[in-house]
Amino acid sequence: MTVVLKLGGSVITEKGEPETVDDDALAAAADAVAASDDDLVVVHGGGSFGHHHAAQFGVSTTDGTHDVAGVRAIHGAMKRLNGAVVAALTDRGVPAVPVHPLSAASRDADGSLDLPTDQVRTLLAEEFVPVLHGDLVAHRGEGASVLSGDELVVALAPAVDADRVGVCSTVPGVLDDDGAVVDRIDSFGEVASVLGGSDATDVSGGMAGKIRALLALDSPASVFGPDALDGFLAGATPGTTVVGEGHE
Ligand code: IPE
């Protein structure tokens, strides 16, 4: 079973504190990954490493920068967080290998992403666990713009023929107006009214952007909270299941 798992930046960092890892949360997530028997591709978000710097330099997924100091600050912070994630996994015996999207991916002028994935497929086939991260990408006409972990998930899932996709966020799923978890989403219109923005600095679209992106996938995706990560990796479908149009 091939699984693409995104660990939200807010899950593994203290989102309000610049460049601060939430050590306990990262340890718990790494324990869960280490216990899995699946072929895993791990993607993590930016949390207080990426979003803080991205906001400072006014960079988002659509608005890029030509400021090389900004590029180095944002990418450098994301590499530091990636180092912490890879180290936590390595400590637990996971054969984690860092993959930095800025080194390979690019965006066209229309914003579409070109993400080479052969290296990820080959790493998986050779029984490594590739660990990618939200990053900056070269963006034609814009300089460099933010590449979110959610975009990576959407690009990677078909490339590795994922059976399942999991997005571990700080909330237990998509919540309706009464605060209850929505069980299943198969079109954006159903949930547009309850999908607000994100509560902390987020330059890549919050929950609404996440759901839009996941609806485009062939594989079913689960959006769940940190407490449900073990269950998801054990085969359960916690939180909200997002199933794109035309799929069961
Ligand atoms: C953002 O990645 C990466 C940068 C800001 C450079 P994500 O958008 O996937 O991060 P989270 O999960 O929302 O923190």
Image: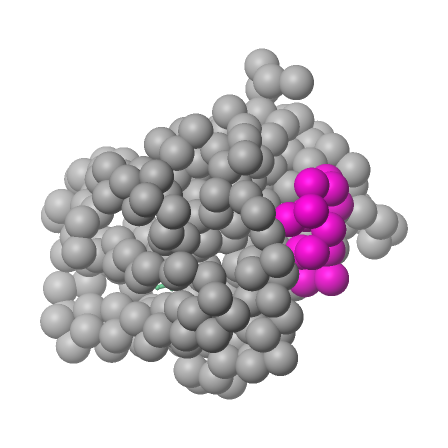
| The quarter of the displayed image where residue 113 is located | top left
Residue 163 in percent (x, y) is at 54, 31
Q: Nearer the viewer, residue 192 or 227?
A: 227
Residue 75 in percent (x, y) is at 26, 69
* 222 vs 196: above or below: above
Name the residue: 42% across, 82% down: 19
The answer, for residue 66, to whether it is visible in the render is yes
174 within the magenta span: no
Is 55 on the left or on the right of 65, as rendered? right
Is 33 on the left or on the right of 248, as rendered? left
Name the residue: 55% across, 66% down: 30
Quadrant of picture, ligand 1: bottom left
* 75 vs 248: above or below: below
Residue 22 in percent (x, y) is at 56, 80
Quarter of the picture containing the C terminus is: top right
* Number of numbered labels in the structure image: 0
Q: Nearer the viewer, residue 127 or 59?
A: 127
Coloured how?
Answer: one colour
The answer, for residue 207, to whether it is visible in the render is no
Q: Nearer the viewer, residue 65 or 77?
A: 77
Residue 2 in percent (x, y) is at 50, 37
* 194 vs 96: above or below: above
Magenta stretch: give its range: 225-238
Is 102 on the left or on the right of 216, as rendered? left
Q: Nearer the viewer, residue 173 or 118?
A: 118
Quarter of the picture containing the N terminus is: top right
Name the residue: 44% across, 43% down: 153
* 184 vs 234: above or below: above
Name the residue: 68% across, 62% down: 226
